[in-house]
Image: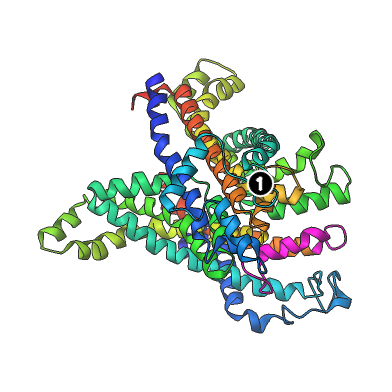
């Protein structure tokens, strides 16, 4: 077990390095002069030179790269160009809100996916299954920037049930979590259904039924536990995708998290802050993938010996 | 093919809608009843009426005309992104799988795996945020995130096909490697690639709309469904029709490509035979 985790950790290192290098390279992709872009028209030469020096862009690229990597290790991502606040501090302040939203969405999608997926599998081909099939296809095709405003219109404006935006307690979390988690709920439902379909055809399920177990025990104690294994991987990978969706969802609901911060930083051309946000989201994604793999090996010991 | 559509009503519906969308995309400027950029401020936020069946937006522009022109943007971006991604992905992934060895390790382990370690849309957001907005950059960013999927698929398929007897036969007859790749391997791996391309259209159209929603896509006044939805956000109270119609257009388009792709996949999946 330990050896497996260690090997998996070592495999993650090159990915982290590539993520870091990519994020470092971003500012060099800006066409023209990034400093002039940030300051906008009408900036004086002294201003441009001063900012260039502050950002270290007047030094050789390799030296910039080295000091950037050193900074990341120390948790120093530079200062925001707009308000001079350390990027790390801005991010840490926003991180809990995004974590709350992402976890809420993940829980929402599991609450939908497990019952609907199981019903789809055991009622295969019947009306209930066809409904599940259509609903999941709709869920996959309905982007969060269409779902969110529709939910606001329906549940907040027309029915007055839930708040429109902001973050202030559980009631504020519901709509953003459904918006962000809708797609994940649909893909996970498909996975649960497909996986359960595979399992209920297996011999051990027939054995369980033959020895007279009631249907609920057969489904949930036997088939579901095995069916869960492939679902975990897909769910883990997809749950990481939630983080990318926060940029859109947090914008819709003015949810004060990392996604909204990224969006605002892009609007302000605050390049150090954008780099910090992208790096944080990407690294969180890498960590979630790592955790998924480890969890997978805990649930299914066969993985460790491959 | 006709048997396929007879068995798959949803796929047929998807196929017909895709055809209709292609028609609209080509002839949008002639189909649109108004100039999509023409502002009529006295009629701003007006609901659906005889003159404007889908209502007007915040600047008094006709929403139906904007949706029709938006179809053109979506289809063009989607088709360009998918076409370029398929070409780049199949060439890189296919060659890596065909040649094998160090090249394969470099491409799959380093390039493909690390690109897959990023959530795609975040990568696209990052690229456009730094490259700046514009149609060409948008397409570049979307190709940058989507070629990887085709590369991985093509590599896997090539690995499977290249050991088959007809490939060995061609080699024994003295065919060159590029010739074997183009004439013998490519036709045998193209089917799954096309299925993925159908679903890839849905993904590319959604990604374009996401970026336009964030203000990182097509520059105004060119209408895009994503930017129309962004405009609508501020008028949920007084003009909900601004959200509903572009959403319906987007969802219908994405659904029809998904229907088509899903049905093709099920149809060609040997596990579903019999």
Q: The numbered mark 1 sits on a residue in which chain?
A: A
- Residue interval drawn in magenta: B218-241
Choose between A72 and B255: the one closer to the eye: A72
- A235 sits to left or right of A269: left
Among all residues in the image, which is located at the extreme front? A46
Choose between A52 and A219: the one closer to the eye: A52
Q: Quadrant where the N terminus of chain B lies?
A: bottom left
Q: Residue at x 49, y 29 (%)?
A: A229
Q: Position of residue A22 (x, y in %)?
A: 47, 49
Q: Position of residue A88 (x, y in %)?
A: 62, 39
B240 inside magenta stretch = yes
Q: Position of residue A24 (x, y in %)?
A: 49, 49
Q: Residue at x 31, y 56 (%)?
A: B94
The picture quadrant where one finds residue A117 is top right
Q: What colouring method underlies this structural image? A: rainbow
The answer to whether one can see residue A286 in this image is: no
Q: Residue at x 59, y 19 (%)?
A: A217
Choose between B23 and B76: the one closer to the eye: B76
Q: Position of residue A27 (x, y in %)?
A: 52, 55
Choose between B93 and A228: the one closer to the eye: B93
- A272 sits to left or right of A11: right
- Residue behind mark 1: A259
The answer to whether one can see residue B190 in this image is: yes
Query: Does B239 sit above or below residue A156?
Result: below
A105 inside magenta stretch = no
Residue at disc 1, secondary structure: helix
Q: Residue at x 66, y 43 (%)?
A: A258
Question: Callout 1 environment at 10 Å: few (<14), some (14 to 19), or many (20+)?
Answer: many
Query: Does B258 sit above or below residue A99?
Result: below
């Amino acid at each position: 077990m330990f050896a497996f985790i260690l090997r998996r950790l070592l495999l993650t290192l090159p990915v982290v390095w590539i993520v870091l290098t990519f994020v470092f390279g971003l500012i060099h992709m800006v066409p023209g002069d990034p400093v002039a872009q940030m300051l906008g028209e009408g900036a004086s030469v002294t201003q441009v030179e001063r900012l260039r020096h502050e950002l270290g862009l007047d030094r050789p690229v390799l030296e910039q790269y080295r000091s950037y990597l050193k900074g990341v290790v120390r948790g120093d991502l530079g200062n925001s160009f707009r308000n001079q606040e350390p990027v790390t501090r801005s991010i840490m302040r926003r991180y809990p809100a995004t974590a709350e939203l992402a976890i809420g969405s993940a829980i929402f999608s599991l609450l939908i996916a497990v019952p609907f997926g199981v019903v789809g599998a055991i009622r295969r081909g019947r009306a209930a299954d066809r409904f599940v099939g259509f609903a999941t296809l709709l869920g996959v095709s309905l982007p969060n920037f269409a779902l969110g405003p529709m939910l606001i219109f329906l549940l907040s404006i027309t029915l007055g049930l839930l708040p429109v935006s902001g973050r202030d307690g559980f009631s504020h979390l519901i709509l953003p979590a459904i918006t962000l988690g809708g797609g994940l709920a649909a893909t996970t439902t498909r996975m649960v259904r497909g996986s359960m379909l595979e399992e209920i055809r297996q011999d051990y399920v027939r054995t369980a039924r033959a020895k007279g177990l009631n249907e609920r025990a057969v489904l949930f104690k036997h088939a579901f536990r095995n069916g869960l294994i492939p679902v975990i991987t897909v769910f883990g990978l997809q749950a990481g995708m939630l983080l990318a969706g926060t940029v859109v969802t947090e914008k819709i609901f003015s949810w004060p998290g990392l996604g909204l911060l990224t969006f605002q930083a892009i609007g302000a051309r605050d390049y150090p802050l954008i780099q910090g946000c992208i790096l944080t989201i990407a690294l969180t994604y890498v960590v979630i993938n790592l955790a998924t793999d480890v969890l997978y090996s805990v649930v299914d010991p066969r993985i460790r010996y491959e | 093919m006709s048997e396929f559509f007879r068995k798959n009503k949803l796929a047929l519906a998807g196929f017909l809608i895709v055809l209709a969308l292609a028609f609209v995309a080509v002839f949008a400027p002639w189909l649109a009843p108004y100039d999509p950029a023409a502002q009529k401020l006295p009629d701003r936020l007006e609901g659906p009426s005889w003159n404007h069946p889908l209502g007007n937006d915040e600047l008094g522009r006709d929403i139906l005309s904007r949706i029709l022109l938006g179809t053109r943007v979506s289809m063009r971006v989607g088709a360009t992104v998918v076409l370029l991604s398929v070409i780049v992905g199949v060439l890189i992934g296919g060659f890596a799988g065909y040649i094998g060895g160090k090249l394969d390790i470099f491409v799959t382990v380093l390039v493909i795996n690390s690109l897959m370690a990023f959530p795609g849309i975040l990568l696209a957001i990052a690229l456009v945020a730094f490259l700046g907005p514009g149609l060409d950059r948008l397409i570049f960013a979307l190709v940058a995130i989507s070629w990887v999927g085709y590369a991985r698929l093509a590599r896997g398929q090539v690995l499977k096909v290249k050991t088959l007897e007809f490939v060995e036969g061609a080699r024994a007859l003295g065919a060159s490697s590029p010739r074997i790749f183009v004439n013998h391997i490519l036709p045998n791996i193209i089917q799954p690639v096309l299925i993925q391309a159908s679903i890839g259209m849905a993904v590319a159209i959604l990604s374009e709309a996401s970026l336009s929603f964030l203000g990182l896509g097509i520059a105004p006044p060119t209408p895009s469904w994503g930017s129309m939805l962004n405009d609508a956000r501020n008028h949920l109270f007084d003009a909900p029709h601004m959200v509903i119609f572009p959403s319906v257009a987007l969802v219908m388009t994405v659904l029809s490509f998904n229907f088509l792709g899903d049905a093709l996949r099920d149809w060609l999946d040997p596990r579903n035979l019999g």
